[in-house]
Image (cartoon, helix red, strand yellow):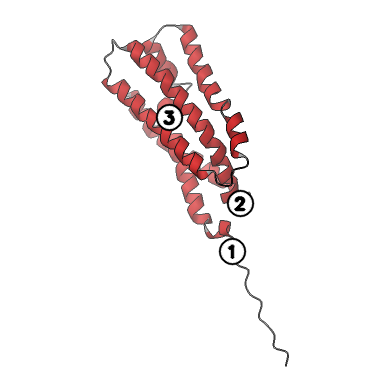
C-alpha cells in the first residue's frame, strides 16, 4: 500500500510570526522619536534657544558641531563593539534609558531655571546634547541591526514612510508646544 502523505504547509519563520507586532512597534518608535525630536530640532529650536542664552557665534556653531559629532563619532566604536554580539536589544535599551531621560532633565532645567541662570542653562544644554546624542548613537547601531532582522526588505520602505508620517503629525503638535 502506497499511502500518499499530504504535503505539510511550510511553517512561518519567526520573523513572519512577529511581523505585525514588529511593524507596529517600529512605526510607533520611529513616529514617537520624530515627534519628540521636534522639541529639540538642531536647525530650528536649538539655535533659537541658544540665541536667547548667548550672543556668542562660536558657541552657536559649537552646538551644531557637538550635535553632529556626538552622534556620528560614537557609532564607529559602537559598531565594532556590537558587531559580534548576538543580542543587541539590551544595549539599545540601556542606551535609550540613559539618553532619553536626559531630555526631560533638560526640559525641567528650562522650565525651572531663572532667566539670569543662562550660564547654567547653557552648560546643561551642552551636557544634555552630548549625553543624548552619544547614547542615541550607540542605540542607533543596535536599532538598525534589529530593524533589518525584524522587518523584511520589501516592507522596510513602507514602515519607515509610515513612521515618518506619524512623526511629522506629532511634530505639528510639538510645534505648538515649542512656540509656547
Residue underneath mark 3: 38
User: Residue 170, located in which quarter of the rendered image?
Assistant: top left
Disc 1 vs disc 3: which is toward the camera?
1
User: Residue 72, located in which quarter of the rendered image?
Assistant: top right
Disc 3 vs disc 2: which is toward the camera?
2
Question: What is the CA distance from the residue labelled 1 to the residue labelled 2?
Answer: 13 Å
User: The residue tagged with tag 3: helix, strand or loop?
Assistant: helix
User: The residue tagged with tag 1: helix, strand or loop?
Assistant: loop
- Residue 152, label in figure: 2
Residue 121 percent location from the top left of the image:
35, 16
- The quarter of the image holding the N terminus is bottom right
Q: With 97 as the anchor, is 88 left or right in this view?
A: right
Whether residue 166 can be seen here: no
- The quarter of the image holding the C terminus is top left
Taking the view exactly as shown, the residue that stands out farthest to the bottom is: 1
Indicate which disc, 1 or 3, sits on the residue closer to the N terminus.
1
Residue underneath mark 1: 12
Amino acid at each position: 500500500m502506497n499511502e500518499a502523505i499530504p504535503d505539510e504547509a511550510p511553517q512561518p519563520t519567526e520573523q513572519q510570526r512577529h511581523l505585525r507586532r514588529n511593524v507596529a512597534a517600529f512605526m510607533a518608535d520611529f513616529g514617537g522619536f520624530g515627534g519628540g525630536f521636534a522639541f529639540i530640532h538642531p536647525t530650528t529650536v536649538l539655535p533659537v534657544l541658544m540665541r536667547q542664552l548667548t550672543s556668542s557665534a562660536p558657541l552657536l556653531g559649537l552646538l551644531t558641531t557637538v550635535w553632529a559629532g556626538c552622534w556620528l563619532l560614537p557609532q564607529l566604536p559602537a559598531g565594532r563593539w556590537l558587531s559580534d554580539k548576538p543580542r543587541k536589544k539590551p544595549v539599545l535599551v540601556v542606551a535609550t534609558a540613559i539618553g532619553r531621560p536626559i531630555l526631560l532633565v533638560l526640559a525641567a532645567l528650562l522650565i525651572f531655571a531663572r532667566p539670569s541662570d543662562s550660564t547654567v542653562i547653557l552648560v546643561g544644554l551642552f551636557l544634555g546634547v552630548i549625553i543624548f546624542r552619544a547614547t542615541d548613537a550607540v542605540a542607533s547601531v543596535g536599532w538598525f541591526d534589529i530593524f533589518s532582522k525584524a522587518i523584511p526588505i520589501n516592507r522596510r520602505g513602507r514602515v519607515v514612510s509610515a513612521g515618518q508620517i506619524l512623526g511629522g503629525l506629532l511634530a505639528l503638535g510639538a510645534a505648538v508646544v515649542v512656540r509656547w
